[in-house]
Amino acid sequence: MQSSARPSPVASIMRFLVLSVVSAGLIVACGHDVPSRLAGVVDSSKSPTRIMVFGGNRSCKPDGHNKLSPLTTDLARNITGMINRMRASGADLEIMLACFTGPGEVLLSYNFSHELETETPEGLVARGVKYADPDARLILIGHSYGGWTAMTVAEEVARKSARSGSVVAGLVTIDPISRKNCTYTSWSNCVTAPADFTEERLEFLRHASKYWANFFQRKTPWLHSSRISQAHFNKELDATHFNIDMHQHLWRHVELLLHDRLTP
């Protein structure tokens, strides 16, 4: 992310979105490869939105108390400001943050609480499915193993839902890597889109998601995802697997996507 004393383009766009109806000209100015269905200010009368953010393997970082925490992942740092701005605009948002400390443990935080809970990677999927209130709009964001987790949770929620059509309001996968197939003993499955997702499963996920944005990179030759044709949007970023979740274009897109999901 670039640092500057001046307000960023994203911050300026956010203020405009909160205060007024977005014009077609503004949408064009933001770029042709970002969501184009922004319609106006946040509608606080709508049902609540639940956002799940899944960091990748070993994405947890020590916080000020020298404890590993999902609050210090790059994903959490980037999304905190977005969530606060949306809440200030009247949006009813709840959020679950998760990060993998290693192969066998996950840490969770609900609504940015410093009271953390531990879980297994398998249990994380079950937690996500349970957290997905059927009356709430659901947005899932994940990087690496977390991207695969977001896809898995979205699929499970859709299969269990009594509703038809798009059950997931927004899905953002950031260089998603299969936790089942990509292991330290099976590197061949670490250089493709999540290998355990068949074409049939990917098609199901496309129809279950109102909007699915997939970001990937190829600069880390032994660990990368790829374009997923079933996603509604694909973008290869000039980044490595380990810093792609900090890419400016990615977070501009996510910010516009979240507003798109929460506008009339």
Image (cartoon, rainbow, N blue to C red):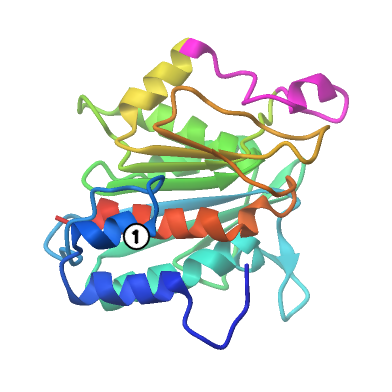
Quadrant in which the N terminus appears? bottom right
What is the quadrant of residue 104 in the picture?
A: top right
Q: Residue at x 32, y 24 (%)?
A: 207
| Towards the viewer: 171 or 66 | 171
Image coords of residue 260 (percent x, y): 27, 53
Q: In this view, does 179 lie above or below 85?
A: above
For the residue labelled by badge 1, is the local secondary structure a helix, a strand or a loop? helix
Q: Is residue 23 above or below residue 142?
A: below
| Towards the viewer: 152 or 131 | 152
Residue 59 appears left or right of 151: right
Residue 144 appears left or right of 160: right
Q: Is the magenta stretch mostly helix, strand or loop?
A: loop
Q: Which residue is drawn at 75% across and 47% down?
A: 240
Quadrant in which the C terminus appears? bottom left
Residue 170 appears left or right of 25: right
Please indicate, yes or no, whether residue 48 appears anywhere in the rendered image.
no
What's under tag 1, amino acid-wise?
Answer: Ala
Q: Residue at x 42, y 27 (%)?
A: 155
Q: Residue at x 34, y 70 (%)?
A: 13
Image coords of residue 179 (percent x, y): 68, 31
What is the quadrant of residue 95 in the picture?
A: bottom left
Please indicate, yes or no, whether residue 65 appears anywhere in the rendered image.
yes
Is residue 186 one of those drawn in magenta?
yes
Is residue 169 one of those drawn in magenta?
no
- For the record, the magenta segment spans 181-199
- Residue that badge 1 annotates: 29
Circle 1 residues within 10 Å: few <14, some 14–19, many ≥20? few
Image coords of residue 161 (percent x, y): 27, 29
